[in-house]
Image (cartoon, grey):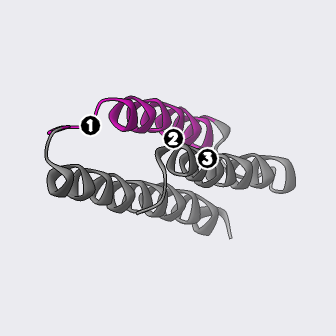
Amino acid sequence: MASVKNLKKDIDLIMSLVISDCFLVLEENSKVDNEKILDIVREVIVKHREFKIRVNHPDGKDNPKMVKQYYKKIVEDLLSEADKALEKLSAEVKKVA
């Protein structure tokens, strides 16, 4: 397992890439519904905060196997949430294409 420090950096990177894609769509496509795109950005920011809190407060600190499973679940959830946000963004773009 990677370090907690690297996991935090990964969370920052993935979520910032999703947000940057949202702003790129806003900048390049004037036909999209700005409010819906900004709602996606807001959701990503909330999830980013939740992931950072989860990383800082692991369950079962005394049991290394539980901690490893806990962080593995965070990574799975992170990738899942990023994928959901990008799917929502894609759906919004397809509406105006």
Closer to the camera, 58 or 85?
58
What's the amino acid at mark 1? Pro
Residue neighbourhood size for the residue with mark 1, other residues' Cα within 10 Å, grouped as few (<14), some (14–19), many (≥20)? some
Residue 20, magenta (yes or no): no
Residue neighbourhood size for the residue with mark 3, other residues' Cα within 10 Å, grouped as few (<14), some (14–19), many (≥20)? few
**Dots 3, 2 in contact, CB < 8 A:** no
Q: Position of residue 6 (x, y in %)?
A: 57, 51
Q: Position of residue 32 (x, y in %)?
A: 69, 51
Identify the residue shown where x is 41% and y is 54%.
78
Cα–Cα gap, marks 3 and 2: 16 Å
Closer to the camera, 79 or 72?
72
Cα–Cα gap, marks 1 and 3: 17 Å
Is label 3 in a helix, a strand or a loop? Answer: helix
Is label 1 in a helix, a strand or a loop? Answer: loop
Residue 69 occupies which quadrant of the picture? Answer: bottom left
Question: Mark 2 — residue?
Answer: 44
Magenta range: 35-61
Question: Mark 1 — residue?
Answer: 58
Cα–Cα gap, marks 2 and 1: 21 Å
Identify the residue shown where x is 60% and y is 69%.
94
Sequence-earlier tag: 3 or 2: 3
Closer to the camera, 94 or 9?
9
Q: Position of residue 15 (x, y in %)?
A: 58, 48
Sequence-earlier tag: 1 or 3: 3
Sequence-earlier tag: 2 or 1: 2
Residue 40, magenta (yes or no): yes
What's the amino acid at mark 3? Lys
Question: Mark 3 — residue?
Answer: 9
Disc 2 or disc 1, which is closer to the eye?
Answer: 1
Identify the residue shown where x is 86% and y is 56%.
28
Instruction: State the quadrant of the C terminus.
Output: bottom right
